[in-house]
Amino acid sequence: MKLFAYTSAAILLSMSTGSFAASAFAGKAKAAAVCSQCHGIKSPNAEVPFPPLAGRDELYLESALKQYRNKTRRSDVMNNIAAGLSDRDINNIAEYYSRLKP
């Protein structure tokens, strides 16, 4: 019985400390709301020449967004946008865009 209690507690603790899988579905919704106006979904918006994100490396996207959020990578626009993203949002967006074919 004690083993069960310890195992259950360990599982709950690991879940509450940020252990989660990225969700491409959630990333799609967040990308549509936050990223697509400038970067498009599969190609950049014709009016704003920002690079497309479709097919980019997932770890690169995560790293870049976290750097923008932490202001170790400078861009007035991206610093402001990334400031509102949680780690989960960043992981989901990176998962979504990395799975798209350019």
Image: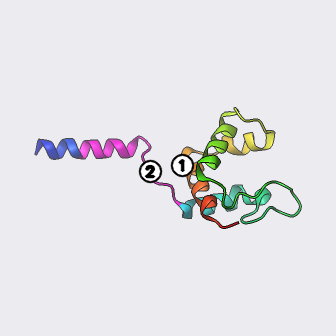
- The single residue placed furthest to the top in the displayed view is 72
Res 92 quadrant in image: bottom right
Residue type at numbered disc 1: Arg
Left or right of 5 in this view: 68: right
Q: Which residue is mark 1?
A: 88
Give how far apart the Cα atoms at labels 1 and 2 are. Answer: 8 Å
Q: At x 64% / y 49%, what residue is drawn?
A: 61
Asked where in the image residue 44 lies, by quadrant, the reply is: bottom right
Q: Residue furthest right?
A: 47
Give the residue displayed 27% in from the left and 42% down from the top.
10
Quadrant where the C terminus is found in the figure: bottom right
Amino acid at circle 2: Phe
**Location of residue 86 by image quarter:** top right
Instruction: Please give the residue where the numbered disc 2 appears in the rendered image.
Output: 20
- Percent from the top left, x then y, of residue 98? 61, 59
* Numbered mark located on residue 38 in the image: none
Closer to us: 41 or 98: 98
Spot occupied by residue 47 in the image (x, y as percentages of width and height): 89, 61
User: In the image, which residues are magenta?
Assistant: 8-23
